[in-house]
Amino acid sequence: MTDDKSTMSSTEEDLENIGIFRICPSLKPYKDHFKYRMKRYVDQKKLIEEYEGGLEEFAQGDSDFWHCFMFVFLFYISMHTN
């Protein structure tokens, strides 16, 4: 089992070695912003995995919402049409 420190150092190492800079060195002046965005992504992904069960389950959540919305919409239409 890994501890949080090894995961954190791995994440920090990944943030330092963003592959896009090897492909396009002209982006290096924006390295801090790339690191910021990547960290935000990693943090959000971790929260989604923890509280929603994973990215796939999170993405399916909208389908439940739209099914409910359509049911209510169709019910409303049926009640207000002659």
Image (spheres, rainbow, N blue to C red):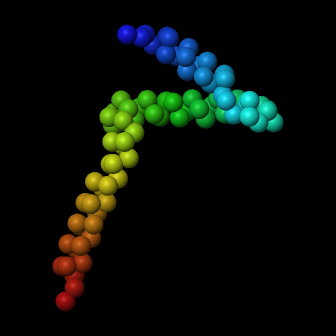
The answer to whether 63 is drawn above or below residue 1 in the figure is: below
Residue 27 visible somewhere in the drawing: no
Q: Quadrant of residue 10?
A: top right
The N terminus, quarter of image: top left
Residue nearer the viewer, 64 or 77: 64
Task: Name the residue nearer the viewer: 46 or 55.
Answer: 55
Question: In the rendered picture of this protein, how many numbered marks are placed on residues?
Answer: 0
Q: Residue furthest front?
A: 23
User: Left or right of 51: which side holds 39?
Assistant: right
Asked if residue 2 is positioned above or below residue 70 in the image, the reply reads: above
Of the 4 image quadrants, the one containing the C terminus is bottom left
Please indicate whether residue 44 sits to the left or right of residue 72 in the image: right
Residue beneath the point at 23% across and 66% down: 71
Residue that appears at 70% across and 29% down:
32
Name the residue rendered at 36%, 29% in the picture.
50
Q: Residue furthest bottom?
A: 82
Asked whether, in this view, residue 43 is left or right of residue 63, the answer is right
Instruction: Kindly give the residue lying farthest to the right in the view shown.
Output: 26
Quadrant location of residue 31?
top right
Work out whether residue 3 can be spotted.
yes
Rendered location of residue 56, percent (x, y): 37, 42
Residue drawn at x 43%, y 10% as measured from the top left: 3
- What percent of the width, then of the height, locates residue 23? 74, 34
* Looking at the image, residue 43 lies above or below residue 12: below
Q: Percent position (x, y) of residue 75?
A: 20, 72
Residue 2 is drawn in which quadrant? top left
